Structure formats: structure tokens, C-alpha cells
Image (cartoon, grey):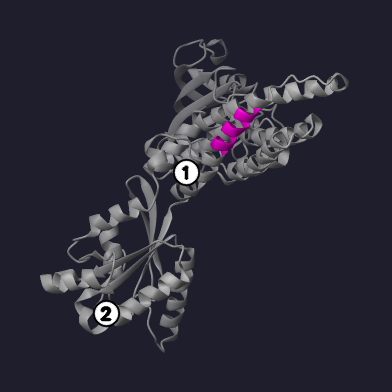
Amino acid sequence: MTHQDTIVALATPSGSGAIAVIRLSGSDAIVIADSCFKSVTSHKTLVKQPTHTIHLGHVVDGDRELDEVLVSVFKNPNSYTGEDVIEISCHGSPFIQQEILQLFLRQGCRMANAGEFTLRAFLNGKLDLSQAEAVADLIASDNEASHQIAMQQMRGGFSSEIAKLREELLNFASLIELELDFAEEDVEFADRSQFKELVERITFVLKRLIDSFAVGNVIKNGIPVAIVGEPNVGKSTLLNALLNEERAIVSEIAGTTRDTIEDEISIGGIGFRFIDTAGIRETEDVVETIGIQKTFEKIDQAQVVIYLFDSSKMISELSSVKVEIEKIKNKYPQKPLLIIANKIDQLDDLLLATLQNEIEGIKLLSAKSGFGVEALTNSLLELINTGALRNNETIVTNSRHYDALLKAFEEIQKVKYGLETGLSGDLLAIDIRQALYHFGEITGEITNDDLLGNIFANFCIGK
């Protein structure tokens, strides 16, 4: 892939709309756009216009006018990519979009690859690699929490923290490397006590960032919650109440849900993906049996399990409910389990009190009337440690960053052990270099074409 030519792409989603934006970037972007632009002001040329200006006119193909447009001019280095950039706002007809794109291709542009505008921004020093990756996360964010994390990373919160640690470690590395040049004179340039303090501080920060991935990953990808229980206990009614729409079929007939039904909502800015599963029971129905098998598969995939039972049948079935709860606890001991008694509107106060005494931590619900739904959503939020998010701390959401942090942490532990055991400077230097390498992987100081190709291939065209 060459990064010297001029690229063009549609920056807005394809299809009809009020307007569409076509973006060009490269050394010839302004010249090419100027050759196809006729200003409403006579004799105005884009080449002579100052940066960050907008101009009204027409895109023309010879004597043929294609559309009336607004052209934005951004001159290097003060643009998103660091190159000359042109953005053309045209009418959102798919025909017009293609006509303009084809015109620029004939004038010498090349169609941009996925993420190539942001890749050029990285290569030209406008963004570091973690900031560039945050651009894709920002585009993909579909709730308040993921948006907040992506914005913080794009502003450089994460990379600046890593860069500061790397710079301090690099300074000590330089002093230790200098000691190696004077090995015969037995001099010590790097203060070992200060170095130990730095290593302790780096260890603390790395551990906090590594631990934050548990929260960051679920915020980014949503938290799968399986709603399980016997047939006809109100699982589908609960899903509908949570989503506030008739998403699942509700019927008095047991076994209505034969397959899993999934939908996602945002609660407190966090994405939760609720999975309504087939009721668990003994059955000879082949299709229902397959649905029940899928239920257990979804429980395996879920991070939270809601066990729902019909409290109106409490007296006759309470013992079997307790058995099922213990089965789930024993099979999935690491998964948070919320035990919900549904249809409590059919119980009197005495039976409610008995129910709460019999099953520890039980939550009361009437999915049909909506009572207890808000308390349930609050309980779900309590399971997620959002303290770091509320305090605007750095949260790691990228698995590539997480892997690099783990490797850096491992190398720093070796450095720490070396300092404690009086390891020689040449061996210390090897471990420090490795830690610096993994820090550099995050921000892009250390990279290769394959890595960049994998990262930017996940971007949309035009970004």
C-alpha cells in the first residue's frame, strides 16, 4: 500500500440521505478537486484559498454540472490526516455520490482502503496508535459508557499515561546502558533506590490498567445476561418489560419459546444483552429439546444469570425451585446469580414473607405490572464495578493493549526481581528493553505493517 497518492472515499454511510460527504486526502487533493470545481464566485480557485474555509459552487465534469456542493479545504499539516484534505458536501443521492467518486477516480485519485485516512493520520504523527484505535471504538460506541471510554482514549488519556511511564523507564535504561560503557571502572549512574521506586510505581499502574480490562471489556462488548427458569414462569414477559416492547411471544401455553431471543438495552450507560431462553423441563418434543440445549449453551456464554420462578406456585414447587437454584450455583459458581420470584401480585403478605425467609437474597417481581423491574436493573448495575468509569480513570478495552500490558508487567517483575537480587546491569538492561518494547507496541513507537494492516482493516471505508 502506498501512502503518497491521493485517496478518495465516501465518508458518510452509503444510500440516500439529505447530504453525503466525499473526502479526498493527499498531495494532489486540492489540485484535483479544483479541476472539477466551479465556484459561484467567478475566478475563485481552491488552490489559492486559505485552510479551514468552505466554498459554494458546482462539481463539473467538463461542461456538465453534477451537483451544487460545499467544498471544505484543509491544508497540511493542519488537517485530520496531516495532508491536504478536501471534503465535499453534496446531495445524498446514490447516483450523485457515484458520479462524483467516478469523476475523481478518472482525475487520478485512488479509492481509499478501510481506515486509510486514520492510518495516514497515524503515519503523519497526528494520532498515536492507541488514539487511532479509539476512533474505531468511538464510531462503534452504542452506549454512554463505551462512548466515554473511547473519547478519553482518543484525547490521549491512556497513551499519555503509558508514554510518561515509558519515558521515565527509558531515562533509567539510558543510565544503566551508560554504566555498561564504564564497566571496568565500576561506576553507578542509575540511583538504585530511585529506580526501585519507579519500578514499584510502574507495577502499580500496570496492575490497575490490567485489572480495568475486566470492566472495559464488558462495557465495550455489552454484558450478556441469560434469563432462565422453567416454562411459563414469565421469562418472555420479563424480557418485554426490560425492553419496554413486545419483543418475545407471551402465552399461557408452556414451552412457547423454542429458541433463544436476544436484545440489548442500555442501563445506566452500560450495554446489557438479555437472552430469553427456552424453559428448562423434561420434554419429548424434539424442537423444544433443542431449545433447552441452547439454553445451557447461553448460560455458558452469559456473564450474569437471572433465575426466574413462578411464586404463585411456591407452596407446591418451592423444594424443586431450591434444587434448580443449587444446580445452577454448583455448575456455574463464578457467575453472578440473581434469583427472582415472579408473579408476586398473586401472593398475600404472609406468603411473601415466607418466600423471603426461605430463599436468601431473593428479589420480588411482577413482570406483568412492571413492579420490581427498576430494582432488578439497579441490581444488575451493582454487579458491574463502574467506580473507575465514574471517577474518569483510564479503562482498558482493547485486547491488543491488554496483551501488551500483561507482557510489560511480566518484564517489569523481572526487573524488580533483578534489583532485589543485585542482578548485573547488562542483564537488567535486557529486561528493561523488553518492557520498553511492549510499552511501545501500545502507542505505536514499535510496530510493523502486518499489525497496522490488521488494526485498520476493521475500520469503515472513509475514516
* Magenta part of the chain: 195-206
Camera-nearest residue between 241 and 119? 241
SS at circle 2:
helix
Which residue lies under the disc numbered 2? Answer: 318
Q: Main secondary structure of the magenta part?
A: helix
Which residue lies under the disc numbered 1? Answer: 140
Question: Residue 57: horizontal and vertical position, in percent?
Answer: 46, 20
Instruction: From this view, report whether residue 288 is shown above or below residue 398.
Output: below
Among the 4 quarters of the image, the one containing residue 425? top right
| Residue 197 forms part of the magenta stretch | yes
Instruction: From this view, report whether residue 418 is shown above or below residue 291.
Output: above
Q: Residue at x 58, y 24 (%)?
A: 126
- Amino acid type, label 2: Leu
Q: What is the quadrant of the C terminus in the image? A: top right
How far separated are the C-alphas under marks 1 and 2? Answer: 45 Å
The answer to whether residue 278 of the structure is visible from this angle is no
Question: Residue 379: horizontal and vertical position, in percent?
Answer: 30, 55
Q: Residue at x 69, y 32 (%)?
A: 436
Question: Residue 409: horizontal and vertical position, in percent?
Answer: 63, 41
